[in-house]
Image (cartoon, grey):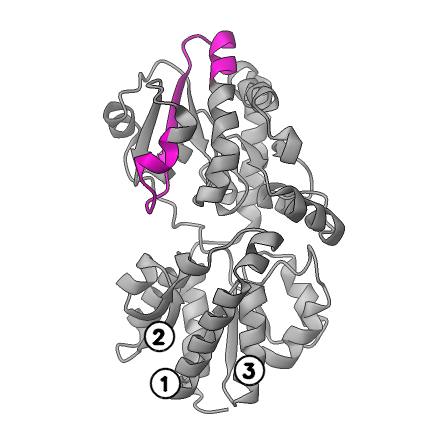
Amino acid sequence: MHGAALMKAMNKRRSDLRFIGIGGDRMIAQGLKPIRHSSEIAFLGFFEVIRHLKFINRVFQETLSALKNQQPDLVILIDYPGFNLRFAEKSRKLGFRNLYYISPQVWAWKKGRVNQMARCIDRMLVILPFETDLYREKGMDVHFVGHPLKGALIPEKSRQEFLRDTRLQPERPVIGLLPGSRKQEISKLLPEMSKACDTIRRQIPDIQFVLGMAPHLTIEDYQPYLKNRTDIQMVREATYSVMAHTDAVLVASGTATLETALLGTPMVICYKLSPFSYYLGRLLVKIRFIGLVNIIADKKIVPELIQNDANAKKMAEAVTLFITDKKVRAQTKENLKAVSDRLGEPGASERAAKLAIEMIDKGPA
């Protein structure tokens, strides 16, 4: 998503650009010639990455070959540090310039990576305000461009259209379900979310539920965990509408939590990993919160239910509070607005594009 927005902004500045690399449908629509589709390497968790390491290494070698054959004017790396930092080191040794857009979360774990990045990254573009000092201390050329989601989140439908199309009643409260975009996430979270709906309904009889489907998944990917229940409306290509037009959301940890925050809707962050991945994560990750919303706020402004706590009972208790307690709801919305304000002004992709084009225009290193 962020890569496509950057490409679009770069193409507006220059009409002669060609892009090759790893990306998804949105980047391909902006002109990317794909070496591989990003969904092919979207593995989640330490154990899952290890299981697919042979395949990931094959993709790495294919991308490195493309680098040597295409001789690009600029290498742009977007997040995904396990792959991209290795690639940046190879790229630098071959004499190419590296622009890193959207910093890996080195402040959460592996801070030693900053030293590695200082050696092989020519320019770092960060989207969270507190990241700037981390890189500046190492003498890096770092720029805070703001968050690309600011100003870019436009619900696909108006509230009236959304409620009409999903057969929801405007006078009744609505809870959104966003169990993630990976099958692995859905298999772990959706069964508990479904059970939570039953608990919530016993307390709020007129409650309504709507589930936002990931665009690349089918109804068959969700149905085994819903058991053909008809009281949860399922919508496709309306994720932002689910976030914006519901009263509260149960959401998988990730970008969706920040999107929901920017649209001002109270949420409960939920997450489950395999026991092995979670154990390693607890050993390695050194932050108080996992949700970007809470990390940016530097305090818990929305509930986080992780691993065993991501169960139906606790989900129901946490999300119900946003429906039944007006004071809690109002305070949460105020806190979400403060997080949004910290993320800068709209136009991050355009600012990032300007800095990328500037590097291209300078010519060879």
Question: Does residue 212 belong to the magenta stretch?
Answer: yes
- Most foreground residue, 4 or 245: 4
Mark nearer the N terminus (3 vs 2): 2
The CA span between labels 1 and 3 is: 15 Å
**Circle on res. 148:** none
The residue sitting at 51% across, 63% down in the picture is: 145
- Classify mark 2: residues with Cα within 10 Å, few (<14), some (14-19) or many (20+): some
The CA span between labels 3 and 2 is: 17 Å
Magenta span:
198-223
Residue carrying label 1: 70
Q: Secondary structure at mark 1?
A: helix
Left or right: 202, with 170 as reference point: right
Image quadrant in which you'd find residue 236: top left
- Classify mark 1: residues with Cα within 10 Å, few (<14), some (14-19) or many (20+): few
Q: Position of residue 94 (x, y in %)?
A: 52, 89
Mark nearer the N terminus (1 vs 2): 2
Q: Are marks 1 and 2 in contact (CB under 8 Å)?
A: yes
Q: Position of residue 130 (x, y in %)?
A: 65, 57
Q: Amino acid at mark 3?
A: Lys
Left or right: 136, with 59 as reference point: right
The quadrant in which the N terminus is found is bottom left
**Circle on res. 20:** 2
On screen, residue 364 above or below 176: below
Q: Secondary structure at mark 3?
A: helix
The residue sitting at 66% across, 61% down in the picture is: 106
- Most foreground residue, 334 or 166: 166
Q: Secondary structure at mark 2?
A: strand
